[in-house]
Amino acid sequence: MWEKFKKWSFENQPDTEPSDRIIRFGLVMAIPIVLWLLTGLITIVSYLGVPDSPGSFGDMFGSVNALFSGMALAGIVYTIFIQKKEFQLQREELKLQREESKLTREVFITQKFETTFFNLINLHHDIVKGLSYQKLNDGNFVSGREIFMVLVEEITDDFENYNVELKKGLIENFYNRVFKYLEHYLRNLFRIIDQIDEEEELAEEKKQQYYYSLNAQITSSEKIIIFYIILFINRSDFAVSFNKVVKLDEYHDLLFYENDKSDFLKIMYS
């Protein structure tokens, strides 16, 4: 019975209107008053008249002190229950605020990074549009992404005319011929990769999403040319960075020699 009364009178108080709280508090206070009045009435009836002396009559109401003490205690208990419930709600609210703050911070970090990332992507496309290269066979100039297709044709012709023992010299000649045209392009591309890798606030799965997005901006011809440039310059940091974006599994049908992949792995893990 007490549990039902406590639940009705004390629990869920913050969810009610102020007027409901006052009514409930008044009802709680009324209970001891009614009990006191009934006790006094019974006492008076038991005397069946006026007491023998004023002192005796006053003793009839000696329980008033106990009444008000009980009311004060009931008020304190009521206040404690209300404060306990409010503290619980405050803790829950603070927890929600911390979660919202964490989420807001993550959104801010993502938005900040994406602004930089997509600006670099736009710069990458602008650099590609500005690329220019003079073809070996006819001396005509090509521009934009078309130069990578021309370079693949040229390196393919070179490699078909020589055996695998001369591959290193072929790649060296190719590098010396084309690097000056692609230096700015390569620096910006690897800067984008480093930007993703160095962002400590990003989870690894988020980084992978940005690597996939960058991969989608690079054509197969570009990947071949970049691969053989890294193979020549023998830079493990470039190999590791490039492999984050373009996985070696993509090269099964692109590489000119079967051992190119193993050579690349040696560079990457050196």
Image (spheres, rainbow, N blue to C red):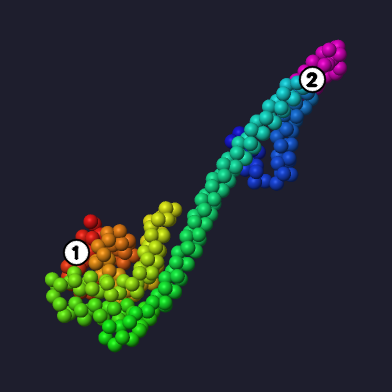
The image shows residue 144 at horizontal and vertical percentages of: 38, 79
Above or below 80: residue 257? below
> In the visual, does 188 lie left or right of 249?
right
Q: Which mark is residue 61?
A: 2
Q: Is residue 94 magenta?
A: no
Q: Quadrant of the C terminus?
A: bottom left
Along the viewing direction, whichever of 157 and 64 lies nearer the viewer:
157
- For label 1, the crowd category at 10 Å Cα-Cα, with few meaning under 14, some 14 to 19 and many 20 or more, is few
The image shows residue 76 at horizontal and vertical percentages of: 67, 30
The structure residue drawn at horizontal position 33% and vertical position 82%, both measured from the top left corner, is 134
Query: Please, what is the three-letter code of the amino acid marked with disc 2?
Result: Phe
Label 2 or label 1, whichever lies nearer to me, is 1
The structure residue drawn at horizontal position 32% and vertical position 77%, both measured from the top left corner, is 148
The structure residue drawn at horizontal position 33% and vertical position 86%, both measured from the top left corner, is 140
Query: Please, what is the three-letter code of the amino acid marked with disc 1?
Result: Ser
Numbered disc 1: secondary structure: helix
Tell me, yes or no, whether the two marked residues, 2 and 1, touch with CB atoms within 8 Å: no
> In the visual, does 29 lie left or right of 123?
right
Above or below 161: residue 176? above
The image shows residue 80 at horizontal and vertical percentages of: 64, 33
Q: CA distance from mark 2 to mark 1?
A: 104 Å
| Magenta segment | 42-63
> In the visual, does 81 lie left or right of 221?
right
Along the viewing direction, whichever of 232 and 7 lies nearer the viewer:
232
N-terminal-most mark, 2 or 1: 2
User: Can you see residue 209?
Assistant: no
* Residue picked out by circle 1: 262
Numbered disc 2: secondary structure: loop
